[in-house]
Image: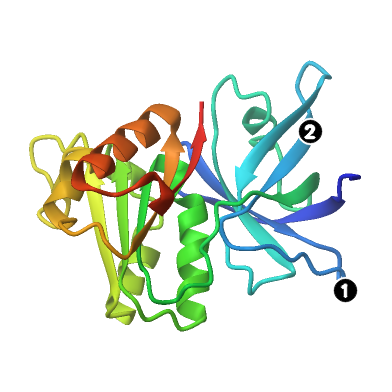
Amino acid sequence: MALQKYLTTISKIDALNDHVKLFRLSFPHGKPFHFIAGQFVIISVTDLDGKPQRRSYSIASSPAHTDYIELCIKILPDGRVSGVLDTFNVGSVLEIDGPYGKFIVDNDSTKELLFVGAGVGVAPLRGMLFDLFEKGYTAPVWLFFGFRYENDFIFKDELCALEEQYHNFHFVPVLSRPGEHPPPDLDAGHVTDIIPLYLKDPTGKAVFICGSLPMVKDVVGILEKIGVTKEQIKTDAWG
């Protein structure tokens, strides 16, 4: 099947911290882009050596917005794609194709959902959460979000606001390198340390994990010890 390619325009760039940016890519007027929350697109660019490069990035926005998508991208010093994107400005044109992926929530609205993300792995989970609550999901929803330093707590205000707005949303931010004076409202450690403190009964739950491959494997191992089955887990890993 031929790739469905789109020429998008960067309409907004937000620096979430000193190494992560949120890019909003807008589609031409009258040409909506449809996807399912949790899916990804592939960006095509020419790198600084003149070579073509392609990278996958999860969509961090809600499918309710068909005129744009948002991508949460970690800018790497030697990144073949992120390094190029870091030179782009609002108004730059970017080619993408997609959407792809099966990291999506099934249509069973009775399951308790557990989302686990680390670093920019929270990106697709953000879009999935927006989508669920926009559609009126009423079963319990958890987000365990692990990050190293306080500065890495991206989307903090948004996620905390969601927890205040929706009584069925339980947000557990986890700081792995807290320093001398850790904030009292954050759990300290790794998500693998914290999940067993909250998750006691594995039945009737669906789990979605996004992050680096080692992190995903560690979380799956912890969940299986608690009694969560492989059939209950969906993963989106890189590296």
Q: Position of residue 108 (x, y in %)?
A: 47, 73
Q: Position of residue 137 (x, y in %)?
A: 43, 79
Give the residue pinned by disc 2: 45
Q: Are marks 1 and 2 in contact (CB under 8 Å)?
A: no
Colour scheme employed for the rendering of this structure? rainbow
186 horizontally vs 232: left or right? left
Classify mark 2: helix, strand or loop. Answer: strand
The N terminus lies in quadrant:
top right
- Name which quarter of the figure residue 162 lies in: bottom left
Can residue 17 be seen by looking at this rendering? no
Whichever of callouts 1 and 2 sits on the residue coming sooner in the sequence is: 1
Can residue 64 be seen by looking at this rendering? yes
120 horizontally vs 29: left or right? left
Of residue 172 and residue 181, the one placed in the foreground of this image is 172
Location of residue 41 with respect to 222 vertically, above or below: below
Residue drawn 30% across the image and 72% down it:
140
Q: Amino acid at mark 2?
A: Val
> For the view shown, which residue lies furthest in the top direction?
49
Residue drawn 40% across the image and 57% down it:
155
> For the view shown, which residue lies furthest in the right direction?
2
> How busy is the neighbourhood of tag 2: few (under 14 within 10 Å), some, or many (20 plus)?
many
Say how many tags the image has: 2
9 horizontally vs 16: left or right? right
* Numbered mark located on residue 30 in the image: 1
Q: Position of residue 172 (x, y in %)?
A: 24, 57
92 horizontally vs 160: left or right? right
Q: Amino acid at mark 1?
A: Gly
Residue drawn 54% across the image and 45% down it:
21
> How busy is the neighbourhood of tag 1: few (under 14 within 10 Å), some, or many (20 plus)?
few
